[in-house]
Amino acid sequence: MRYCFLVDNNIPQLPEILENIGEVHKFEGRQLTNEIVKQSKATILLVRSTTKVNEELLRGTDIKIVGTATSGSEHLDKKYLEAQGILYFDAIGSNALSVAEYCMFCILSYAEENNIDLKSKVLGIIGYGNVGKRLATIAKHIGISVVINDPPLLESNPELLMNETHLEINEIVQVADIVTNHVPLTMSGKHKTHNLIDNRLLEKVKNGALFLHSSRGGVVCEESWVRLANSGRIVVDADVWMNEPNVRSKSVSAAKIATPHIAGHSYDAKLRGSLMLAKSLERILQVKLDTSQLEIECNSNKKDVSKLSKDEIFSLLKNKRIDETSSEFKKLASDEEISNNFEKMRKGYPKIRECFYDFEFKL
């Protein structure tokens, strides 16, 4: 059987792999329209986060399967897809190591600039999923104490937390010298995360603490962290923002490190996303795809972080050009400039490779 695919051209190597089992049409993420989908006659749509997959895009089309090559899937209207009987899947965890590396660079930069001995500090991780686990492993390797908060995981799989110190969120923000959050953005439910870290919680963060924000803009009250950062109460490094790409310049200027949502934007994350989509399609379509080159490239030129010193880790992470990207982003002086350049900076972000072998990644 031959298939018809519609694939974002920013999903590396996947179109070439899929050409062996069907017809492949490529598109630019934000430029995809309902008419383009209809004309393609595609039954399988593969996207990244820049494409909103909803009724407006899919009404009257032949799409039966949707996959996103990204860890987050907020851009998929899941209720609509389920109502239409359209199968959907994501690549959760594909960019987790990249985000963990970003956070570790921020932590090491903060320590170096302030002459801090990290072995005397506590890292509080809110959300112990794909990113949180990787960051905790690296942090503990260099001697940082780690405490975590993840109520859904505590309820569903408490055995996964046996070796960790789990605290309530009110406690974690008070005891941690460094606070980071790695939860998905959910708008409802028992464990909704929208505005999870509100003004009340932020006011409890230690004086002078480092607050890392690299999950989703809506998880943290931006007005509050901007106010606290500007007052010198806390130091904030931020990669995610409210209302992207319409980010406020006053928020960007308040952060010590400010980047345009590129923490997970490594080339390896994209390769891993391609690989995960390919493996999902193999299972769904009952076909065999040649992913050997993808698998080789995902693991090429990587270091084992468990065998590196803190200084060696920091030296490697400097190659990710986070400081340089922050300086460029902070030069955008107005809301309009930021809005006009946000996606350009993301798309033009250099072909950055991850530094370490992904010790948690499993297909």
Image (spheres, rainbow, N blue to C red):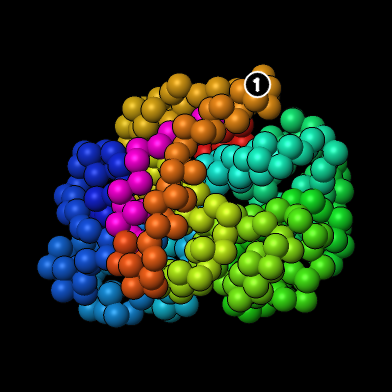
Please give left or right for residue 157 compared with residue 55 in the image: right
Frontmost residue, 140 versus 199: 199
In this rendering, the answer to whether 267 lies above or below 328 is: above
Frontmost residue, 36 versus 166: 166
Residue at 47% over, 77% down: 79
Chief secondary structure of the magenta portion = loop
Which residue is outermost to the left? Answer: 39
Please give left or right for residue 168 compared with residue 78 in the image: right
Location of residue 133 in the rendering, given as x and y in whole percent from the top left corner: 69, 44
In this rendering, the answer to whether 307 lies above or below 64 is: above
Which residue is outermost to the top? Answer: 307
In this rendering, the answer to whether 188 lies above or below 296 is: below
Numbered range of the magenta stretch? 342-357
How many residues crowd mark 1 within 10 Å: few (<14), some (14–19), many (20+)?
few
Q: Secondary structure at mark 1?
A: loop
Residue 150 can be seen, yes or no: yes
Q: Is residue 348 magenta?
A: yes
Location of residue 193 in the rendering, given as x and y in whole percent from the top left corner: 65, 71
Tag 1 residue: 308
Residue at 35% over, 38% down: 351
Q: Residue flagged by tag 1: what amino acid is it?
A: Leu
Please give left or right for residue 146 compared with residue 76 in the image: right
The picture quadrant where one finds residue 115 is top right
Residue 153 can be seen, yes or no: no
